[in-house]
Image (cartoon, helix red, strand yellow):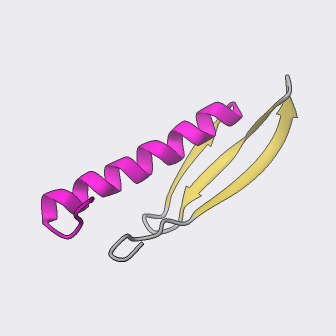
Amino acid sequence: MAGKKEETFVIRIHDCQNSTWQGSILWAEKQERKCFRSTLEMISLIEEAVQLDRENKALEGGYHEK
């Protein structure tokens, strides 16, 4: 995994209803916090953040996928 930057997310589960989690997620490197209403939405937020970061790195010329 040389050249790949790791991302850190802090997840807080505030409640569990309808067999899924509700809470907030903090993207530590950007200090951005978002709330989620389901586990699937939480995973989507993480995927979106990682994809955005990869696209930004590619535009800056600092990240190349193989």
18 vs 46, left or right, is right
Instruction: Give left or right: position of 15 versus 46.
Output: right
Q: Residue 10 placed where, x, y %?
A: 64, 61
Extreme residue in the top direction = 18
Q: Find residue 59 and report its horizontal and vertical position in percent.
A: 14, 57
User: Residue 5's x, y, as percent?
Assistant: 40, 71
Image location (x, y in percent) of residue 64: 22, 63
Question: Closest to the observer: 15 or 6?
Answer: 6
Q: Which residues are magenta?
A: 37-66
Give the residue displayed 53% in from the left and 37% down from the top: 44
Q: Residue at x 64, y 32 (%)?
A: 40
Classify residue 29 as left or right of residue 2.
right
Quarter-of-image position of residue 4: bottom left
Up/down of 66 relative to 40, above or below: below
Name above or below for residue 1 compared with residue 10.
below
Residue 65 drawn in magenta: yes
Residue at 33% of width from left, 49% of height from top? Answer: 52
Residue furthest to the front in view is 66
Task: Point out the image quarter for the C terminus.
Answer: bottom left
Quarter of the image with the N terminus is bottom left
Principal secondary structure, stretch drawn in magenta: helix
Residue drawn at x 42%, y 64% is: 30
Residue 57 lies within the magenta run: yes
Left/right placement of residue 25 relative to residue 50 reads right
